[in-house]
Image: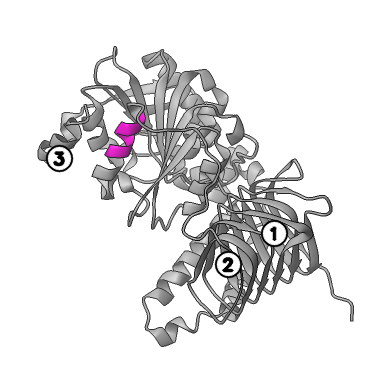
Amino acid sequence: MKSFIFIFYFYSSFLGANELMGKFVMEPIFNSSVYLQIVGNPSKPAVLLVHGLGDEASTIWEHTVEFLKNDYYVITFDLPGFGKSSKDNQLYSPQNYAKFIRYLTQTYLKKPFHLIGHSMGGAIVLKYTQMYPLDVESLVLVDSVGILHRSAYSDFLTQSKINHFFDEKNEYIQRLQTRKFNNFINKITDKIEQKMTLDTDMALSNKNLRGVVFGGNPTVIAGVALMETNFNGVLENISQKTTIIWGEEDNIAPLQAGYVLNKLLPHSILKIIPNALHIPILSHEKDFLKILLEHLEGDLIFTKEPEKLVNDTKSYKIEILNTDKKKFTGNIQSLIIKNSQKIIIKDAIIEELFINNSDVEIVNSTFKSKNNIVLTAQNTKISIIASDILGTIKLDNSKLSLAGVRILAEKKPIEVVSKSTIIYSLCKINNKFIHGKEMISIKKAP
């Protein structure tokens, strides 16, 4: 079938959507009419495709379906609330969507299948696999949304918009993006979240409240229900081979969520598509289909190997001041960062890190030292993603976002000296799962 990928493009542009005809069926979970499409030979391996939020619904899979239909039995559909399916004031949660998909598979498939989800569909297929693991042969997650805590996701969207604005301006305007300005934006997002005092679980579960609070809008309901879903402690128990595909420049689903998924899923591999945004299925179709085919044909290796240091394997001590957009990797014995923005530390082993008045992101790294405190942050915004910390983090008037982080400390894992905010996404702190946000106010002694 590999040769098919090369000839596929010669005729795919001539295929119309009408050549893949679907039908409408009634389903009992939402009591709705659902647009369903089944193509291919039932004796072939089965593939089920799940779309995300958006009016285009299952149409994003049209070329994927054409690409697979000769060698696979392919099922796709418009989720209830989207596309051609019924739209109503229902609880469109990942759990209910999983129950809906189970009805379809038990009615029209009745055998294990490969499960592929994009955006919100990625969260849905993870929930399905948690609930019905024997049904699923393997997983493909494409730019999945709803993995990180909602506060981390809100921060990402806000910051990406700010970065986009400044990146388009001249060098003088870019220099105005100071730590003080970023602190101002952080305060705004914190105040917005503090105003959201409504019990969203109650609003979601009550039809009348869904109508009042969310206007009965399926997209809004599905989006809020997605953000309220907690996968902490779930991913580690998913045993299926999983390929994670991500657009490198995704401005909707942060790439850091891809790193988190790859760290926590036991049998996974992360494939990043350069220059792609949120829908590489369409924008980088050839790259996407190549990875998908490698997954389905079993050409990818899912065995996790110990992290290897890249580029720089020397141990070093360094201090940087007033520096922007710098990247560090390798063995870091001691690193001091002051008054610097957009600093990235990736694939590193860190003994001691001190950060003051800066913005730093740490990815796929390990903190370990003979000293108890391995990281000190003062007046700083810091994100740590898919990393292990053996020791204590010390915060002083800082904002810390932890995603897919494991902390094991003999003493207190996080020591807060003065007012600081911590966001936990799918974390495990001294063997306790944590997924949430805490704002700690401690006044310094005069």
Residue 204 seen in the figure = yes
User: Which of label 2 and label 3 is nearer to you?
Assistant: 2
**At x 51% / y 18%, what residue is drawn?**
134
Q: Is residue 434 left or right of residue 261?
A: right
- What range of the chain is rendered magenta? 290-295
The kind of residue on which mark 1 rests is Ile
**What is the secondary structure assignment of the residue under circle 2?**
strand
In depth, the one of 394 and 166 nearer the eye is: 394
**Which residue bears the numbered disc 3?**
9
Res. 422 mark: 1
Distance Cα–Cα, label 3 vs label 1: 48 Å
**At x 47% / y 84%, what residue is drawn?**
175
Distance Cα–Cα, label 2 vs label 1: 15 Å
Please provide percent x and percent y for residue 359. 58, 70
Res. 360 mark: 2
Res. 140 mark: none
Please provide percent x and percent y for residue 283. 27, 50
**At x 34% / y 40%, what residue is drawn?**
57
Residue 15 seen in the figure = no
| In this view, 224 is above or below 180 | above
The kind of residue on which mark 3 rests is Tyr
Dot placed on the residue nearer the N-terminal end, 2 or 1: 2
Q: In the displayed orientation, state which residue is furthest to the right.
A: 446
Please provide percent x and percent y for residue 222. 49, 42
Crowd around label 2: few <14 · some 14–19 · many ≥20 (10 Å): many
The kind of residue on which mark 2 rests is Val
Asked whether disc 2 touches disc 1, contact meaning CB atoms under 8 Å apart, the reply is no
Q: Is residue 19 left or right of residue 330?
A: left
